[in-house]
Image (cartoon, rainbow, N blue to C red):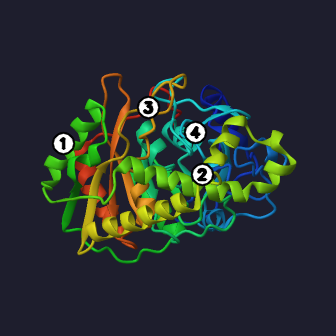
Amino acid sequence: MINWSDLEKANEKLNAFTDFNTHASFDEGPLEDITVGVKANIAVKDLPWTAGMEAYRDRVAEEDSDAVTKLRVAGAAIIGMLNMEEAALGAKTDNPFYGATQNPHKIDFTPGGSSGGSAAAVAAGICDVALGTDTMGSVRVPAAYCGIYGLKPTRGAISQDGLEIVEASLDSIGPLARSLDELETTSRVLMEFEYNQAIENIKLLENLGDVECEPAVLAAYEKVKEVTGATASFSLPHPLTRIRFAGFILSSLSLANELADILENDPGGLSDNLKKLLTYGPGRSAEDLAKDREILGETSDAVIAAVADRGAILLPTTPQAAFSHEAKAPANQADFTCLANIAGLPAITIPAGWNDDGLPVAVQLIGAAGNEGGLFDLARKLDNQLFAYRKPEIFMNKQ
């Protein structure tokens, strides 16, 4: 039985849920007794479908998204909608219309974005599993900052039906959970990956692409490298900062097209910050856009080649741990995570350690298309040696 009073009380500290569905109930199936929160850009019938935008505050979904339908059929209780970065374009989940979501490991710190509500709610035990969306890392970044597990699936493996799109070629719906077992069970409900291709070789990015990482991130990454025994490396055809920027430009251009009617007819429904972000793509010259697409294509080829022949890539999930809401978001947040989206490959993030302030840091594994099963097997082997998951200070025991 769901204790709504306790859920609402726990949520007051974090602002992870924007709306609760007090009519939610469980059913029989592989997810019976599992509570699920859904990011506000994914449709849940009869609940607000805002995508974190003021322009959609009064919009209510008429039908469940395909992903939510599968979770219901599997017995899960869909308990409400989760806060997010406005239009899923951002890094902190400090929403100008729906408020800031807090990291349950440290209040006044970001849970990450854009699926910050999803990660905070799961980490704090307000729900067992959450759906987020990942355009260039928006499931894995908040999962890393909140010390939990998250999956970005193979491109197209989970239907985009009922999803407010940022950029269709980069977007994936993905689950977050407090254990790999719950993450895998949920993932197998959402998508099919019937075989496990055992991963036999792990690649490392040369010099981590010259991305500056915090000491705790590097220490955790070195520990995982030692555990895996990985020594093989690969390189990218362009600097990671340039690759990530090309992905942002594509996202800005696509989202500006998606929101063109609002920009023209209801500009007050979008924040000034989002409107500024939406100028970068459309303001790009045809020549520069062609170069951006060339960079993304060459990067995709290099990443896919690195995971060929039963391979996987090991990287930090983010270059840093969570930071204060008052601080400017680091530009390099998605430097590592963007690679899986650009190449259309599956990636799993797992907790790997903590910094001196007790904030979690994480590593991610990127695998070949369709080999989620192999990634889960490898992630579980590492997780069993790292023992890096810990509950945050703010945690609600399941009722």
Kindly identify the amino acid type of the residue bearing the numbered disc 3.
Ala
Few, some or many residues within 10 Å of mark 1 (<14, 14–19, 20+): some
Q: Which residue is mark 3?
A: 322
Is mark 1 in CB contact (under 8 Å) with mark 4?
no
Q: Position of residue 297 (x, y in %)?
A: 42, 68
Q: Nearer the viewer, residue 358 or 27?
A: 358
Kindly identify the amino acid type of the residue bearing the numbered disc 1.
Lys
Is mark 4 in CB contact (under 8 Å) with mark 3?
no
Q: Which residue is mark 4?
A: 126
Chain-order first, disc 4 or disc 3: 4
Kindly identify the amino acid type of the residue bearing the numbered disc 2.
Val
Q: Quadrant of the C terminus?
A: top right
- Disc 4 secondary structure class: loop
In front of the other: label 1 or label 4?
Answer: 1
Q: Is residue 178 visible?
A: no
Query: Which residue is located at x 81 percent, y 62 percent?
Result: 62
In front of the other: label 1 or label 2?
Answer: 1
Q: Position of residue 147 (x, y in %)?
A: 40, 39
Q: Position of residue 187 (x, y in %)?
A: 48, 63
Q: Which mark is residue 36?
A: 2
- Disc 2 secondary structure class: strand
Q: Position of residue 112 (x, y in %)?
A: 51, 38
Label 1, label 2: how far apart the Cα atoms are: 33 Å
Query: Which residue is located at x 35 percent, y 70 percent?
Result: 301
Label 1, label 4: how far apart the Cα atoms are: 31 Å
Chain-order first, disc 1 or disc 2: 2
